[in-house]
Amino acid sequence: MANNVTSIFLLGFPNLHNFTFPFFSLLVLIFCGTISGNLLIMVLYLVSKTLQSPMYFFITQLSLCDLLLTTDIVPVLLHTVLYGGGTITLIICMIQFSVYGTSETSECLLLSVMSYDRYVAICNPLRYHFIMNHRFCVISVIMIWLMGFIFLVLDITSILSLHFCGPHVIDHFYCDIGPIVQLSCSDTSKIYKQLLVMGSLILLTPFIVIVTSYVYIVITILKIPSNTGRHKAFSTCSSHLTVVSTFYGTLIIVYMFPTTGDSLTLSKVLSLMYTVLTPLLNPIIYTLRNQDFKNAYLKLKHMF
C-alpha cells in the first residue's frame, strides 16, 4: 500500500454545539450498559445449567460480537464527540475496520443460524435435539467466525492494493471500508464491484435464510389450534425477530442507499443504531423477556 497518508481525521458529529456534553454522557451510559449486559449474559451461560441449550449458546456468541463491536467503536466515538473530531493513524483505522468488519459479518451469519434454530424448534420439535446437537452448534460458530475472517482478509487485501495520497479526512465516526476507499487516488471501480458482491452475500443471503425460516414458522404457528399454543410458540422467537428487524433494517438502509449530502447525516445516525444502540438492546431484549435468564440471574445473585 504505497501512500503518503499516515493519519486519518474522523469528523464524527461536528455540529453538536450545546449538545456535546449530553450526547457524550449518554454514550458513556450506553457503553457501560452494553459492556455490563453482554458480560452478564456470557457469565450466566457459563455458570447456569438451565441455559445449556443451542439457543442460549448462540445468544452468548451474539453477545461476544456486540462486545467486540462496542469496544471497537465507542471509545473512538467518545473522543471525536468530546474534541469535535479526532486523529488516528492509518494502521489504527485499519485495525478498527478489521474488528468492526469481522464482528458485523459474524453477527449477520449468526442471526441466520439463530433463525434456523427457531425454525427447527417450532416446525420440527421432535427432532430438535438431534438436529441442533452440540457438534452442529460448535461447527456452525467456528464456520461463522472463519467466514467473517475470510471476508475481512479479502477486504484488507483490496485496501492494501490501493494508493493513498490524500485527503486524510473521513466524514464519519469510525473507519468503514467505503470511506477508506474514498481516500484513495487509485481506480476503485473494481473494489466497489467487489464490495457490492460481498455486501450482497453478507447481508442478503442470511436475510433470505431468516425470511424463509420465519415464513415456515408463521405457517406452522397458524396451524396450532389454541390461542395459548400460538402465543407460546411465537414468544419463543419474538425476541430474535425484534433483534433481526432492528439490526438488518438499519444495516440494509445504510449500505444499499447512497450516502451523500443530507443522506450522509442520516447514514451516521442509522450507523449509531447498529454500532452503539443495538449492542445495548440485544441483552435487554433477550433477558427481560426470558424467564430462564431471569431465574439464572436470581440464582447468581443469591450465590453472592
Image: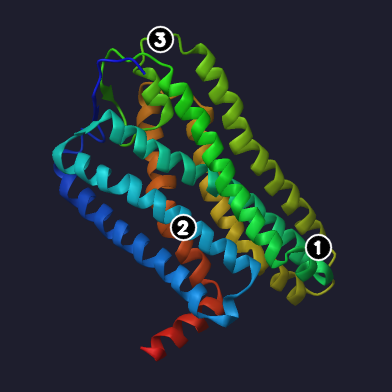
Three-letter code, disc 2: Leu
In screen coordinates, is 92 left or right of 104? left
Camera-side residue: 87 or 155?
A: 155
- Distance from the alpha carbon under mark 3 to that under mark 2: 36 Å
Verify CB contact (< 8 Å) between mark 3 and mark 2.
no
Q: CA distance from mark 1 to mark 2?
A: 28 Å
Earlier in the chain: of badge 3 and badge 1, it is 1
* Disc 2 element: helix
The answer to whether residue 115 is seen in the rendering is: yes
Q: Amino acid at mark 1?
A: Cys
The C terminus - image quarter:
bottom left
Say how the picture is coloured. Answer: rainbow
**Residue at horizontal 60 percent and vertical 75 percent from the top:** 52
In the image: residue 227, left or right of residue 24: right
Identify the residue under disc 1. Answer: 123
Which quarter of the rendering shows the N terminus? top left
Q: Quadrant of residue 31?
A: bottom left
Secondary structure category for the residue under label 1 = helix
Front: mark 3 or 1? 3
- The residue beneath circle 2 is 64
- Of badges 1 and 2, the one in the foreground is 2
The reply to whether residue 270 is visible in this rendering is no
The correct choice, above or below, for 185 with respect to 80 in the image is above
Which mark is first along the chain, 2 or 1? 2
Badge 3 or badge 2: first in the primary sequence: 2
> Residue at the location (54% across, 29% down)?
256
Q: Crowding at label 1, few (<14), some or many (≥20) Cα neighbours within 10 Å?
A: some
Relative vertical location of residue 94 with respect to residue 273 in this rendering, above or below: above
Which dot marks residue 186?
3
